[in-house]
Amino acid sequence: MANIVVCPACGIKNRIRADILGVPLCGKCKKPLPVAKATDIPDLTVDNFDSVLNANPRPVLVDFWAKWCMPCRMVSPVLEKFAAAHASIALAKVDIDAQPTLASQYQIFSVPTMILFVRGQEVHRLSGAVSAAELAAAFKPWLEKKEGG
């Protein structure tokens, strides 16, 4: 699915894929297009999972979650604030009920489980409802590599 965004610089309509991470550029004038809201976090599927992770130059923190899971719903705003505070990380989500193949492939036995991918490779995982401080501590080595220099 794609969204149509009008370029504020030249007025041309641009089709933006829903799974795109980062700031999209206008196809005509190459100026940045208005960024989607911070709450617009891409939902990953079997079809786009590898391409989204491999195409992103930033580490991608993938939240494996389920609609019925109360801890998942509690940690979701924490993850959104964490990602907003750390621009060096992109956030994406996988609904394990809608994507059981991905849940099985990544051996998700409990939710929420957050996995950090760097250039498409898993580098760290964390399970359970956690605070922003616990997220920062768990992913500190990867945050420092990007944000510290």
Image (cartoon, rainbow, N blue to C red):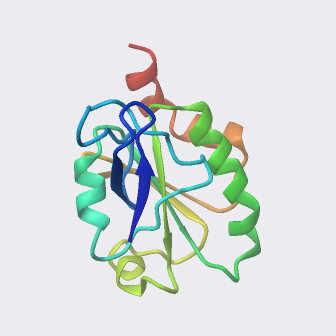
Q: Residue 60, relative to residue 111: is it above or below?
A: above
118 sits left or right of 62 in the view: left
Q: Tell me the residue at 44%/15% (across/down).
A: 148
Residue at image location 63% in from the left, 50% down from the top: 79
Q: Give the number of callouts.
A: 0
| Percent x, y of residue 49 | 31, 66
Residue at 39% of width from left, 40% of height from top?
11
Q: Please state which of residues 94 and 134 is positioned toward the viewer in this rendering.
A: 94
Rendering coords of residue 67 (x, y %) = 66, 79
Is 101 placed left or right of 42 in the picture?
left
Camera-nearest residue between 7 and 61: 7
Which quadrant holds the N terminus? bottom left
Q: Pick whichever, 98 or 139, lies toward us.
A: 98
Vertical comparison of 146 with 149: above or below: below
The quadrant where residue 59 appears: top left
- Please tell me which residue is depicted at 40% across the width and 75% down the height of the picture: 107
Residue 122 vs residue 6, the one in the foreground: 6
Task: List the single residue furthest toward the front.
Answer: 11
Percent from the top left, x then y, of residue 128? 65, 62
Q: Point out residue 126 in the picture as x, y percentages from the top left corner.
A: 54, 55
Q: Is residue 10 above or below residue 72?
A: above
Q: The C terminus is located in which quarter? A: top left
